[in-house]
Image: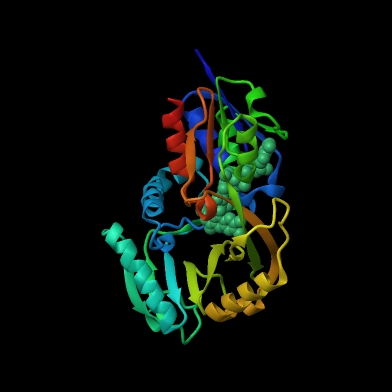
Amino acid sequence: MGRELSVVGGGVIGLACALAATDAGWTTTVYDVGPSARAAHVAGGMLGCLGEGHPGEGRLLDVSSQSAALWPDFLSRLGDPAVHTATDSILLAASSTDFAYLDDQVAFVRDRLPAASLTRSTGSELRRTEPSLGRGLAGGYLAEGEGAVDNRLLIDALAAALRTNGGHIVDAVVDDPTELPGDRVLIAAGLGSAALARVAGAGIPVHGEKGEILRLRRTRWSVPPPTHVIRGRRHGRSVYLVPRADGVVVGATQYEAQGPDDREPQAVGVADLLADAIAVMPGLSSYELAEAAAGIRPSSADGLPVVQRIDDRLLVATGHGRNGIALAPWTASRVIELLA
Ligand SMILES: Cc1cc2nc3c(=O)[nH]c(=O)nc-3n(C[C@H](O)[C@H](O)[C@H](O)COP(=O)(O)OP(=O)(O)OC[C@H]3O[C@@H](n4cnc5c(N)ncnc54)[C@H](O)[C@@H]3O)c2cc1C
């Protein structure tokens, strides 16, 4: 007998879970209101694990490394090589103080993941690996196997694979998930998940962490984009450059959102990102500023994704914070376990 699944939310989590469900034999329909409030639309697309390993977040590092191991199969399942835009990262420190911070971070990661491929290098050694880096940077680590995807191509590829598998995507706002058809209903609506779970009588706390992010486009006169993801630390602030076919994504600030509509970038966030990005890669100064945007990360209280049953029929997958793209394959496999 066929089993039917309704999914609320067509972001990276909803689509990844829906695709895995169709692969597992479920007839699946995704209900989604579109990209304007979708964190996965603005995201950088880093598949962060080693570079996201911060002391005190050991469990998140474990989950991230499990998800990192699933990414090669996840990418081959999608079959579009353009989705994958980088295979390695450079963790970069601008000053000796930034380098000391990075050393502590890497010590924590190595303690938890002894096999992690992290090679300590001086600034000039890193410039030989990635010639676009600025001079005078203190140094950092080469993190092999930690790459990035083009998040917008990823969403398109997930949607295309889902439709090819017979799944449906319906353009609709869902107010009450209990009224949707199907044997099971998955709430995967990012920041909207808490309100939907509340309608179903469940308390799933999700708060919004805002982030500004820029898209810079290469011109005929500019140097090529970097080939690595560059995760920089400068004056104690984080900045990352994520390669794209036509430029780089520069991200991202992080602070508590004022509310679900607080989605416009602030001047100060844009100014800091541009200053730090150009210090890390001076050639970016001649790139075009193609887009300045802000999104809201759906974050849980303890920083871990919330993937669980609400009752016999309802499930929820949300709270992925700053790592929802990276954690998509892990979340999909966990949801399939819960559906089984
Ligand atoms: C600036 C920024 C940079 C980031 N960079 C990275 C990164 O480099 N790597 C990484 O791994 N993660 C990154 N993230 C985090 C990542 O984007 C999120 O964790 C991830 O998108 C969460 O996925 P989601 O599917 O749960 O939510 P979303 O991507 O927000 O998708 C939720 C979907 O549900 C729909 N929806 C909501 N309510 C309803 C409703 N009632 N009815 C119907 N549809 C509804 C929305 O329209 C949306 O399409 C970044 C986030 C931001 C803001």
**Quarter of the image with the C terminus in it:** top left
Q: Is residue 172 left or right of residue 144?
A: right
Expressed as whole percent of the image width and height from the top left, the position of residue 108 reads 33, 64
Q: Nearer the viewer, residue 8 or 249?
A: 8
Q: Is residue 33 left or right of residue 149?
A: right
Residue drawn at (47%, 35%) of the image: 308
Residue drawn at (56%, 44%) of the image: 205
- State the colouring used for the structure image: rainbow
Q: Can I make out residue 26 in this image?
A: yes
Q: Is residue 120 above or below residue 168?
A: below
Expressed as whole percent of the image width and height from the top left, the position of residue 268 reads 68, 73
Q: Is residue 69 left or right of residue 131?
A: left
Q: Can I make out residue 219 in this image?
A: no
Residue drawn at (65%, 70%) of the image: 269
Dividing the picture into quadrants, the one containing residue 13 is top right
**Number of marks present in the image shown:** 0
Dividing the picture into quadrants, the one containing residue 91 is bottom left
Q: Is residue 31 above or below residue 268?
A: above
Q: In the image as oriented, which residue stretches furthest toward the bottom?
A: 136
Q: Is residue 325 above or below residue 160?
A: below
Q: Nearer the viewer, residue 222 or 183?
A: 183
Expressed as whole percent of the image width and height from the top left, the position of residue 287 reads 65, 74
Expressed as whole percent of the image width and height from the top left, the position of residue 153 reads 59, 50
Residue drawn at (41%, 47%) of the image: 67
Q: Is residue 23 left or right of residue 144?
A: right
